[in-house]
Amino acid sequence: MKSIALKDIGFFQGLSPAELSAVKTCLHEKSFEKGESLFYEGDACERVFFVQSGKVKIFRTASSGREQILEVLDLGDTCACNPGVETWSCMSSAIAMTDCRVWFFSRRDYTRLVKTNSQITQTLNRLFAKRLCHFSSLIEEVSLNGVKKRLVKFILDMQNDQASHNGSKGTITIDFTREEIAQRIGSARETVARYLHQLKRSKLIEINPHDIIILNKDGLEKMLL
């Protein structure tokens, strides 16, 4: 399983060796098995996590019981939130999508670090701005686009992301179950399965147990127009 070194986590880049050493003294490490919860919506926010290896999904649950995935945290990502007060309730839940290891600060150490280090404060502001843009796009997609378009966009976004990391041009590895894809795009598992097979019948994609092969990227992109 891939992992990341502390010095390579974007949140801490720009810190001096002495500052990074001070950060290490406050960090703790913990492992979670796939499906294990890191925290629940409404819990008191007692720890701030950084993903060392594996993946973690951040989600909210509607009154109907349906989950909406807000983010998927990958290597080096963090659930870092409001540092302004030492008592804070989690606005979402987090579950390990794979076996994973994380580093974490206590809430008190995290608050103190942000308040005393201007570099961390600037990084946190950029993180919040990026997260706001992501959530704005998510709201737009769920409220304005149909499920089929959201699914196509999900496939293309995953392909573009994987291509930027490993050069893959046509095949994308799917680490999500049908249920998790549905949670990601705000739909039902049955609807996602139906549209995937429609795309397959249209010869736009091929579906294998753990990956999707894009047969006609131009055709998929035209569906988003």
Image (cartoon, rainbow, N blue to C red):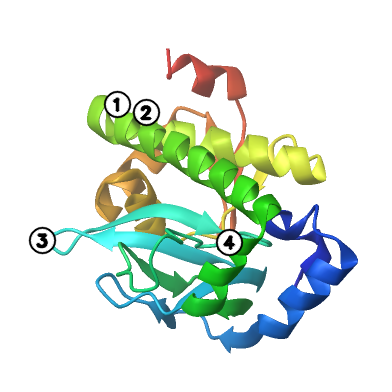
Real-space Cα separation, disc 4 to disc 2, in angstroms: 40 Å
Residue 197 vertical placement versus 17 (above, below): above
Disc 2, disc 1: CB below 8 Å? yes
Circle 2 packing at 10 Å, graded few (<14), some (14-19), many (20+), is many
Q: Is 85 drawn above or below residue 103 in the view shown?
A: above
What's the mark number on residue 114? 4
Query: How far apart in space, not on screen, are marks 4 and 1 (Cα)?
Result: 38 Å
Residue 84 drawn at (x, y percent): 42, 60
Q: First in sequence: mark 4 or mark 2?
A: 4
Which disc, if any, is residue 63? 3
Return the x and y of residue 146 as percentages of the image width and height.
27, 29
Kindly state the secondary structure of the residue where label 3 is placed.
loop
**Who comes first in sequence, dot 4 or dot 3?**
3
Residue furthest to the right in view is 17
Q: Which residue corresponds to the image point at 17% horizontal and 58% vertical from the top-left?
A: 62
| Identity, as a three-letter code, of the amino acid under mark 2 | Lys
Q: Residues within 10 Å of mark 1 (few under 14, many from 20)?
A: few
Disc 4 residue type (three-letter): Val
| Depth check, front residue: 225 or 61 | 61
Distance CA(mark 4)–CA(mark 3): 35 Å
> Residue at image x 66%, y 81%?
27
Which residue is nearer to you in this view: 108 or 158?
108
69 left or right of 120 in image? left
Q: Secondary structure at mark 1?
A: loop
Q: Earlier in the sequence, mark 3 or mark 2?
A: 3
Per the image, the residue denoted by label 2 is 149
| Residue that badge 1 annotates | 145
Amino acid under disc 1:
Asn
Q: Is residue 29 above or below residue 88?
A: below
